Image (spheres, rainbow, N blue to C red):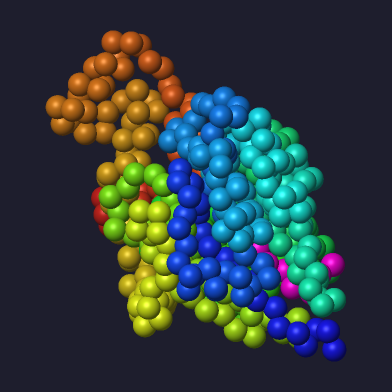
Amino acid sequence: MQASQKHRFLFVGDAVLQSEPEISEELRAQLYAAEIRSCNVEAPLRGFGAPIKKTGPLVAQDPKAADWLIAAGFNLFPMANNHIYDFGPIGMLETMEAFPQDAVLGVGEEEQAYEMLVKTFDDVNYGFLAYGENGYGAINGDRGIGHAWINHARVPADIRRFKSLVDVLIVQVHAGVELLDVPIPEWRAKYRQLIDLGADVVIAHHPHVMQGIEEYKGKLICYSLGNFYFDYPSNHPQWNTGAMLTLDFQHKQRVGYDFQVIKKDGQQLSLEEESVSALWLKNLNEKLTAESYIDYVTQAAVKDWEQHHAGYYAKAFNGVSSYSLKALLKHGKRLFFNRGIDYNMLWHNQFIESNKWLVDRAIRYKFKQENPED
Protein backbone atom coordinates (compact mmCIF):
# COMPACT_ATOMS: atom_id res chain seq x y z
CA MET A 1 0.00 0.00 0.00
CA GLN A 2 2.84 2.36 0.87
CA ALA A 3 4.34 2.01 -2.63
CA SER A 4 1.17 3.62 -3.99
CA GLN A 5 2.30 6.98 -2.62
CA LYS A 6 3.67 9.36 -5.24
CA HIS A 7 7.20 10.71 -4.81
CA ARG A 8 8.65 13.67 -6.67
CA PHE A 9 12.36 14.27 -7.29
CA LEU A 10 13.86 17.38 -8.85
CA PHE A 11 17.24 17.88 -10.55
CA VAL A 12 19.10 20.95 -11.78
CA GLY A 13 22.52 21.29 -13.37
CA ASP A 14 25.78 22.99 -12.57
CA ALA A 15 26.24 25.46 -9.72
CA VAL A 16 29.18 27.75 -8.99
CA LEU A 17 28.07 30.50 -6.62
CA GLN A 18 29.88 33.78 -6.07
CA SER A 19 26.61 35.36 -4.92
CA GLU A 20 23.43 34.18 -3.23
CA PRO A 21 20.65 33.15 -5.62
CA GLU A 22 17.39 35.06 -5.40
CA ILE A 23 14.80 32.41 -6.20
CA SER A 24 11.37 33.37 -7.51
CA GLU A 25 8.32 32.28 -5.54
CA GLU A 26 7.15 30.08 -8.40
CA LEU A 27 10.49 28.29 -8.59
CA ARG A 28 10.71 27.96 -4.82
CA ALA A 29 7.26 26.36 -4.75
CA GLN A 30 8.39 23.82 -7.34
CA LEU A 31 11.49 23.04 -5.30
CA TYR A 32 9.61 22.41 -2.09
CA ALA A 33 7.02 20.24 -3.83
CA ALA A 34 9.74 17.59 -4.28
CA GLU A 35 11.17 15.20 -1.71
CA ILE A 36 14.58 15.13 -3.40
CA ARG A 37 16.10 18.37 -4.72
CA SER A 38 19.45 17.77 -6.42
CA CYS A 39 22.08 20.27 -7.56
CA ASN A 40 25.54 19.56 -9.00
CA VAL A 41 28.16 21.27 -6.81
CA GLU A 42 30.64 22.15 -9.54
CA ALA A 43 33.57 23.50 -7.54
CA PRO A 44 35.18 23.52 -4.09
CA LEU A 45 34.66 26.31 -1.61
CA ARG A 46 37.26 29.05 -1.84
CA GLY A 47 39.94 29.24 0.84
CA PHE A 48 40.76 25.56 1.20
CA GLY A 49 43.59 23.53 -0.30
CA ALA A 50 46.07 24.53 -2.99
CA PRO A 51 45.59 24.71 -6.77
CA ILE A 52 46.54 21.60 -8.70
CA LYS A 53 48.42 21.65 -11.97
CA LYS A 54 45.95 21.15 -14.80
CA THR A 55 45.00 22.36 -18.24
CA GLY A 56 41.94 24.57 -18.08
CA PRO A 57 40.54 26.96 -15.49
CA LEU A 58 40.79 26.46 -11.75
CA VAL A 59 37.36 27.17 -10.30
CA ALA A 60 36.31 27.79 -6.70
CA GLN A 61 33.16 29.30 -5.23
CA ASP A 62 32.21 31.55 -2.36
CA PRO A 63 32.77 29.99 1.09
CA LYS A 64 29.06 30.58 1.80
CA ALA A 65 27.93 28.63 -1.29
CA ALA A 66 27.04 25.52 0.72
CA ASP A 67 24.86 27.54 3.10
CA TRP A 68 23.16 29.28 0.17
CA LEU A 69 22.33 26.03 -1.63
CA ILE A 70 21.00 24.44 1.54
CA ALA A 71 18.93 27.54 2.30
CA ALA A 72 17.52 27.38 -1.23
CA GLY A 73 16.13 23.95 -0.39
CA PHE A 74 18.54 21.52 -2.03
CA ASN A 75 19.15 18.27 -0.19
CA LEU A 76 21.18 16.13 -2.63
CA PHE A 77 24.62 17.22 -3.80
CA PRO A 78 26.44 15.21 -6.48
CA MET A 79 30.06 16.38 -6.69
CA ALA A 80 31.63 14.02 -9.23
CA ASN A 81 32.80 16.62 -11.72
CA ASN A 82 35.86 18.14 -13.37
CA HIS A 83 36.35 21.04 -10.95
CA ILE A 84 35.70 19.57 -7.50
CA TYR A 85 39.39 18.56 -7.23
CA ASP A 86 40.80 21.86 -8.56
CA PHE A 87 42.26 22.67 -5.14
CA GLY A 88 43.32 19.14 -4.32
CA PRO A 89 42.08 16.69 -1.72
CA ILE A 90 41.91 19.28 1.06
CA GLY A 91 39.74 21.61 -1.00
CA MET A 92 37.42 18.74 -1.90
CA LEU A 93 37.21 17.26 1.59
CA GLU A 94 36.55 20.62 3.25
CA THR A 95 33.79 21.26 0.72
CA MET A 96 32.22 17.88 1.46
CA GLU A 97 32.25 18.73 5.17
CA ALA A 98 30.25 21.89 4.52
CA PHE A 99 27.26 19.85 3.33
CA PRO A 100 25.15 17.25 5.19
CA GLN A 101 27.07 13.99 4.99
CA ASP A 102 23.96 12.01 4.04
CA ALA A 103 23.45 14.28 1.03
CA VAL A 104 26.84 14.16 -0.74
CA LEU A 105 27.63 11.59 -3.42
CA GLY A 106 30.27 10.72 -5.98
CA VAL A 107 33.35 11.94 -4.06
CA GLY A 108 35.75 10.94 -1.29
CA GLU A 109 38.05 7.96 -0.91
CA GLU A 110 37.37 5.26 -3.50
CA GLU A 111 34.75 3.18 -1.72
CA GLN A 112 32.94 6.29 -0.51
CA ALA A 113 33.01 7.92 -3.94
CA TYR A 114 31.63 4.84 -5.71
CA GLU A 115 29.05 4.05 -3.03
CA MET A 116 25.31 4.33 -3.62
CA LEU A 117 23.29 6.74 -1.50
CA VAL A 118 19.89 5.30 -0.54
CA LYS A 119 16.82 7.35 0.35
CA THR A 120 13.63 5.63 1.49
CA PHE A 121 10.15 7.07 1.15
CA ASP A 122 7.09 5.04 2.20
CA ASP A 123 9.08 1.80 2.14
CA VAL A 124 10.32 2.44 -1.40
CA ASN A 125 14.12 2.42 -1.68
CA TYR A 126 15.66 4.85 -4.14
CA GLY A 127 19.35 4.60 -4.99
CA PHE A 128 21.46 7.54 -6.19
CA LEU A 129 24.86 7.43 -7.87
CA ALA A 130 27.10 10.15 -9.30
CA TYR A 131 30.02 9.81 -11.72
CA GLY A 132 32.14 12.10 -13.85
CA GLU A 133 34.13 11.54 -16.99
CA ASN A 134 37.89 11.19 -16.63
CA GLY A 135 39.64 14.26 -15.27
CA TYR A 136 42.32 15.52 -12.95
CA GLY A 137 40.32 14.44 -9.90
CA ALA A 138 38.97 11.12 -11.17
CA ILE A 139 39.68 7.95 -9.19
CA ASN A 140 41.11 6.19 -12.22
CA GLY A 141 44.13 4.31 -10.90
CA ASP A 142 46.25 7.43 -10.43
CA ARG A 143 44.81 8.34 -7.01
CA GLY A 144 42.72 6.85 -4.23
CA ILE A 145 40.71 9.97 -3.44
CA GLY A 146 38.68 12.19 -5.74
CA HIS A 147 35.50 11.62 -7.73
CA ALA A 148 33.93 8.48 -9.14
CA TRP A 149 34.81 7.83 -12.79
CA ILE A 150 32.07 6.63 -15.10
CA ASN A 151 34.42 4.43 -17.15
CA HIS A 152 36.13 2.70 -14.23
CA ALA A 153 36.19 -1.08 -14.69
CA ARG A 154 34.17 -1.57 -11.49
CA VAL A 155 31.14 0.44 -12.63
CA PRO A 156 29.15 -2.27 -14.51
CA ALA A 157 29.30 -4.74 -11.62
CA ASP A 158 28.57 -1.96 -9.14
CA ILE A 159 25.42 -0.90 -10.96
CA ARG A 160 24.12 -4.45 -11.26
CA ARG A 161 24.69 -4.98 -7.55
CA PHE A 162 23.20 -1.64 -6.52
CA LYS A 163 20.09 -2.22 -8.60
CA SER A 164 19.51 -5.51 -6.76
CA LEU A 165 19.40 -3.57 -3.49
CA VAL A 166 16.90 -0.83 -4.38
CA ASP A 167 13.59 -0.39 -6.14
CA VAL A 168 14.65 2.56 -8.31
CA LEU A 169 18.20 3.50 -9.34
CA ILE A 170 19.01 7.03 -10.54
CA VAL A 171 22.46 7.75 -12.00
CA GLN A 172 23.88 11.22 -12.57
CA VAL A 173 26.88 11.67 -14.90
CA HIS A 174 28.96 14.80 -15.34
CA ALA A 175 30.25 14.42 -18.89
CA GLY A 176 29.90 15.58 -22.46
CA VAL A 177 31.20 18.12 -24.94
CA GLU A 178 30.98 21.64 -23.63
CA LEU A 179 28.63 24.07 -25.39
CA LEU A 180 27.30 21.45 -27.82
CA ASP A 181 23.52 21.07 -27.73
CA VAL A 182 23.50 17.36 -28.60
CA PRO A 183 25.32 14.44 -26.96
CA ILE A 184 27.97 12.77 -29.07
CA PRO A 185 27.24 9.13 -30.02
CA GLU A 186 29.80 7.74 -27.58
CA TRP A 187 28.01 9.26 -24.58
CA ARG A 188 24.63 8.15 -25.90
CA ALA A 189 25.95 4.59 -26.06
CA LYS A 190 27.41 4.84 -22.55
CA TYR A 191 24.17 6.12 -21.00
CA ARG A 192 22.16 3.42 -22.75
CA GLN A 193 24.61 0.88 -21.37
CA LEU A 194 23.88 2.21 -17.87
CA ILE A 195 20.18 1.54 -18.51
CA ASP A 196 21.00 -1.97 -19.72
CA LEU A 197 22.96 -2.55 -16.51
CA GLY A 198 20.03 -1.59 -14.31
CA ALA A 199 19.71 2.19 -14.06
CA ASP A 200 16.12 3.45 -14.22
CA VAL A 201 17.05 7.06 -15.00
CA VAL A 202 20.27 8.66 -16.27
CA ILE A 203 20.70 12.41 -15.84
CA ALA A 204 23.73 14.25 -17.21
CA HIS A 205 25.29 17.67 -16.87
CA HIS A 206 28.59 19.38 -17.79
CA PRO A 207 28.07 20.74 -21.33
CA HIS A 208 26.85 24.09 -19.86
CA VAL A 209 23.96 24.02 -22.32
CA MET A 210 20.80 21.95 -22.40
CA GLN A 211 20.49 18.78 -24.47
CA GLY A 212 17.49 16.62 -25.24
CA ILE A 213 15.74 13.74 -23.51
CA GLU A 214 15.03 10.26 -24.85
CA GLU A 215 13.33 7.14 -23.60
CA TYR A 216 15.32 3.96 -24.03
CA LYS A 217 13.66 0.64 -23.20
CA GLY A 218 11.09 2.56 -21.20
CA LYS A 219 13.77 4.34 -19.14
CA LEU A 220 14.64 8.03 -19.23
CA ILE A 221 17.93 9.60 -20.32
CA CYS A 222 18.35 13.35 -19.90
CA TYR A 223 21.51 14.28 -21.77
CA SER A 224 22.28 17.65 -20.19
CA LEU A 225 20.54 19.98 -17.77
CA GLY A 226 22.88 22.86 -18.59
CA ASN A 227 23.81 25.46 -15.99
CA PHE A 228 21.71 26.22 -12.94
CA TYR A 229 23.59 29.13 -11.36
CA PHE A 230 27.10 29.49 -12.73
CA ASP A 231 28.85 32.69 -11.70
CA TYR A 232 31.64 32.56 -14.25
CA PRO A 233 32.18 34.92 -17.19
CA SER A 234 30.88 33.70 -20.54
CA ASN A 235 29.45 35.28 -23.68
CA HIS A 236 27.55 32.14 -24.67
CA PRO A 237 23.82 32.94 -25.07
CA GLN A 238 22.75 29.84 -23.10
CA TRP A 239 25.18 30.23 -20.22
CA ASN A 240 22.47 31.61 -17.93
CA THR A 241 19.77 29.21 -19.13
CA GLY A 242 19.32 25.70 -17.78
CA ALA A 243 16.75 23.01 -17.16
CA MET A 244 14.96 21.63 -14.13
CA LEU A 245 13.94 18.00 -14.50
CA THR A 246 11.12 16.78 -12.27
CA LEU A 247 10.46 13.04 -11.94
CA ASP A 248 7.32 11.49 -10.45
CA PHE A 249 7.38 7.93 -9.11
CA GLN A 250 4.55 5.68 -7.98
CA HIS A 251 4.32 1.91 -7.46
CA LYS A 252 8.13 1.82 -7.74
CA GLN A 253 7.93 3.10 -11.31
CA ARG A 254 8.47 6.43 -13.01
CA VAL A 255 5.02 7.71 -13.91
CA GLY A 256 5.87 11.11 -15.33
CA TYR A 257 8.45 13.80 -15.86
CA ASP A 258 8.56 17.52 -16.53
CA PHE A 259 11.24 19.65 -18.17
CA GLN A 260 11.20 23.32 -17.23
CA VAL A 261 13.66 25.99 -18.30
CA ILE A 262 15.21 28.22 -15.65
CA LYS A 263 16.73 31.58 -16.50
CA LYS A 264 19.34 33.47 -14.47
CA ASP A 265 19.38 37.26 -14.58
CA GLY A 266 22.04 38.56 -12.25
CA GLN A 267 21.20 36.86 -8.97
CA GLN A 268 17.56 36.23 -9.89
CA LEU A 269 16.40 32.76 -10.86
CA SER A 270 12.98 32.24 -12.39
CA LEU A 271 11.04 29.78 -14.52
CA GLU A 272 10.34 30.35 -18.19
CA GLU A 273 6.76 30.07 -19.44
CA GLU A 274 5.61 26.48 -19.97
CA SER A 275 5.25 27.07 -23.70
CA VAL A 276 8.85 28.28 -23.90
CA SER A 277 10.11 25.22 -22.02
CA ALA A 278 8.08 22.90 -24.24
CA LEU A 279 9.53 24.50 -27.37
CA TRP A 280 13.07 24.21 -26.04
CA LEU A 281 12.61 20.50 -25.36
CA LYS A 282 10.92 19.86 -28.70
CA ASN A 283 13.79 21.47 -30.60
CA LEU A 284 16.45 19.66 -28.58
CA ASN A 285 14.74 16.29 -28.99
CA GLU A 286 14.35 16.77 -32.73
CA LYS A 287 18.11 17.14 -33.02
CA LEU A 288 18.54 13.73 -31.38
CA THR A 289 16.36 11.98 -33.95
CA ALA A 290 17.23 14.02 -37.04
CA GLU A 291 18.79 12.25 -40.03
CA SER A 292 21.47 14.93 -39.93
CA TYR A 293 22.45 14.11 -36.32
CA ILE A 294 25.75 12.38 -37.13
CA ASP A 295 26.74 15.04 -39.64
CA TYR A 296 25.85 17.74 -37.09
CA VAL A 297 28.15 16.14 -34.51
CA THR A 298 30.91 15.61 -37.06
CA GLN A 299 30.85 19.23 -38.19
CA ALA A 300 30.96 20.34 -34.55
CA ALA A 301 33.99 18.08 -34.02
CA VAL A 302 35.78 19.49 -37.05
CA LYS A 303 35.07 23.05 -35.96
CA ASP A 304 36.34 22.31 -32.45
CA TRP A 305 39.46 20.69 -33.89
CA GLU A 306 40.23 23.65 -36.10
CA GLN A 307 39.53 26.25 -33.43
CA HIS A 308 40.94 24.51 -30.36
CA HIS A 309 42.29 20.98 -30.33
CA ALA A 310 44.73 21.25 -33.24
CA GLY A 311 46.37 24.03 -31.27
CA TYR A 312 46.29 21.97 -28.08
CA TYR A 313 48.20 19.13 -29.75
CA ALA A 314 50.69 21.51 -31.32
CA LYS A 315 51.21 23.21 -27.97
CA ALA A 316 51.80 19.87 -26.25
CA PHE A 317 54.73 19.16 -28.58
CA ASN A 318 55.98 22.75 -28.58
CA GLY A 319 54.83 23.15 -32.16
CA VAL A 320 52.55 25.46 -34.11
CA SER A 321 49.19 24.72 -35.72
CA SER A 322 48.81 27.94 -37.71
CA TYR A 323 51.06 30.58 -39.17
CA SER A 324 49.31 33.68 -37.95
CA LEU A 325 51.54 36.35 -36.45
CA LYS A 326 50.08 35.72 -33.00
CA ALA A 327 50.71 31.98 -33.22
CA LEU A 328 54.26 32.46 -34.47
CA LEU A 329 55.07 34.93 -31.70
CA LYS A 330 53.80 32.49 -29.08
CA HIS A 331 55.81 29.70 -30.68
CA GLY A 332 58.93 31.85 -30.63
CA LYS A 333 58.41 32.55 -26.95
CA ARG A 334 58.13 28.83 -26.19
CA LEU A 335 61.29 28.09 -28.16
CA PHE A 336 63.17 30.88 -26.39
CA PHE A 337 62.29 29.44 -23.02
CA ASN A 338 63.11 25.92 -24.30
CA ARG A 339 59.84 24.40 -23.22
CA GLY A 340 59.69 20.65 -23.79
CA ILE A 341 56.76 18.32 -24.26
CA ASP A 342 53.75 19.43 -22.23
CA TYR A 343 52.54 16.15 -20.74
CA ASN A 344 49.83 17.94 -18.81
CA MET A 345 48.31 19.11 -22.08
CA LEU A 346 48.74 15.66 -23.61
CA TRP A 347 46.92 14.10 -20.65
CA HIS A 348 44.08 16.59 -21.14
CA ASN A 349 43.87 15.72 -24.83
CA GLN A 350 44.13 11.94 -24.56
CA PHE A 351 42.45 10.85 -21.34
CA ILE A 352 39.38 13.06 -20.98
CA GLU A 353 36.86 11.05 -22.99
CA SER A 354 34.94 13.92 -24.58
CA ASN A 355 38.16 15.49 -25.87
CA LYS A 356 39.50 12.23 -27.24
CA TRP A 357 36.27 11.13 -28.88
CA LEU A 358 35.69 14.52 -30.49
CA VAL A 359 39.23 14.64 -31.86
CA ASP A 360 38.97 11.04 -33.13
CA ARG A 361 35.85 12.00 -35.06
CA ALA A 362 37.45 15.13 -36.53
CA ILE A 363 40.61 13.29 -37.59
CA ARG A 364 38.64 10.49 -39.26
CA TYR A 365 36.68 13.11 -41.19
CA LYS A 366 39.83 15.01 -42.21
CA PHE A 367 41.57 11.77 -43.22
CA LYS A 368 38.61 10.74 -45.36
CA GLN A 369 38.62 14.11 -47.09
CA GLU A 370 42.29 13.75 -47.97
CA ASN A 371 42.02 10.04 -48.84
CA PRO A 372 38.58 9.58 -50.44
CA GLU A 373 39.51 6.21 -51.97
CA ASP A 374 40.57 4.60 -48.67
Quarter in which the C terminus is drawn: bottom left
Residue 97 visible: yes
- Residue at 37 percent of width and 78 percent of height: 273
- Residue at 40 percent of width and 59 percent of height: 268
x and y, in percent, of residue 305 in the image: 32, 46
As displayed, is residue 273 above or below residue 315?
below
- Residue at 76 percent of width and 69 percent of height: 126
As displayed, is residue 234 above or below residue 180?
above
Q: Nearer the viewer, residue 70 or 53?
A: 70
x and y, in percent, of residue 339 in the image: 38, 15
- Residue at 50 percent of width and 40 percent of height: 61
Question: In the displayed structure, does residue 35 sit left or right of residue 122?
Answer: left
Quarter in which the N terminus is drawn: bottom right
The question of residue 100 being in magenta is answered with no
Asked which quadrant contains residue 227, the reply is bottom left
Question: In the displayed structure, does residue 254 sit left or right of residue 136?
Answer: right
As displayed, is residue 347 above or below residue 300?
above
Which range of residues does the magenta coloring cover? 165-171
x and y, in percent, of residue 184 in the image: 45, 61
x and y, in percent, of residue 254 in the image: 66, 81
User: What number of labels is visible?
Assistant: 0
Q: Nearer the viewer, residue 177 or 367?
A: 177
Asked which quadrant contains residue 124, the reply is bottom right
